[in-house]
Image (spheres, grey):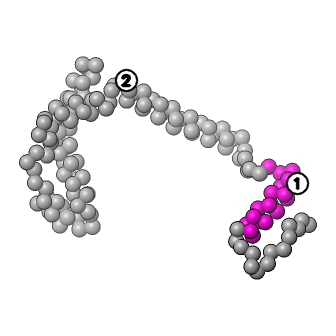
């Protein structure tokens, strides 16, 4: 049996952890064991395929974003839809927010603003799609 020394009542937690870790490390070396547990080949292969699929999807998304100049498209759409004044020019939110919170007591004012934005986007959906099609034709 391996003995590292005596742990007394006054030993600090750090020294106890150190002694335990040292004892485990030395036991692993003596028994010539691996420090890391590596799963079976089938698990490794499955994980590699899943990670590759995720990373490939991210690369495709990035390439599409660059090729279609998505950031420029968003700026152009916002400008064409809202003009210089902004999409919510002269709109007052208090009444709509209050009504939303009456109808949805457990929600927050942030949820009510999101609801207003969603409603506005739903109304503008056809304009957004037309703007995207025009943008793509011009590119």
Left or right placement of residue 39 versus residue 90 in this view: right
Residue at screen point 24% across, 19% down: 138
Residue 129 seen in render: no
Which comes before the other along the chain, label 2 or label 1? Answer: 1
Tell me the distance, in whole angstroms, between the alpha carbons under discs 2 and 1: 56 Å
The residue carrying mark 2 is: 67
| Magenta-colored stretch includes residue 138 | no
Residue most toward the right? 1
Residue 19's spot in the image, x, y percent? 78, 66
SS assignment for the magenta stretch, majority: helix
Q: Quadrant of the N terminus?
A: bottom right
Residue at screen point 76% across, 80% down: 9
Left or right placement of residue 10 versus residue 64 in this view: right
**On screen, residue 14 above or below 56:** below
Instruction: Say if mark 2 contacts mark 1, CB within 8 Å.
Output: no
**On screen, residue 86 above or below 32:** above
Depth order, front residue of 29/117: 29
Left or right placement of residue 138 versus residue 13 in this view: left
Circle 2 packing at 10 Å, graded few (<14), some (14-19), many (20+), is few
**What is the magenta range?**
15-34
Residue 62's spot in the image, x, y percent? 42, 31
Residue at screen point 67% across, 41% down: 44
The residue carrying mark 1 is: 31
> Helix, strand or loop at disc 1?
loop
Residue most toward the bottom? 9
| Magenta-colored stretch includes residue 32 | yes
Left or right placement of residue 67 versus residue 129 in this view: right
Q: Quadrant of the C terminus?
A: top left
> Helix, strand or loop at disc 2?
helix
Circle 1 packing at 10 Å, graded few (<14), some (14-19), many (20+), is few
Residue 76's spot in the image, x, y percent? 22, 30
Residue 92 seen in render: yes
């Amino acid at each position: 049996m391996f003995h590292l020394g005596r742990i007394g009542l006054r030993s600090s937690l750090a020294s106890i952890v150190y002694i335990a870790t040292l004892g485990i490390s030395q036991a692993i070396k003596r028994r010539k064991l691996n420090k890391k547990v590596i799963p079976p080949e089938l698990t490794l292969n499955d994980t590699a395929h899943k990670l590759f699929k995720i990373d490939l999807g991210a690369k495709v998304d990035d390439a599409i974003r660059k090729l279609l100049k998505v950031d420029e498209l968003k700026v152009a759409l916002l400008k064409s839809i809202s003009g210089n004044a902004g999409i919510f020019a002269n709109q007052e939110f208090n009444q709509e927010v209050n009504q939303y919170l009456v109808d949805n007591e457990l929600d927050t004012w942030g949820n009510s603003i999101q609801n207003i934005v969603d409603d506005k986007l739903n109304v503008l959906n056809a304009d957004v799609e037309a703007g995207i099609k025009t943008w793509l034709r011009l590119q």
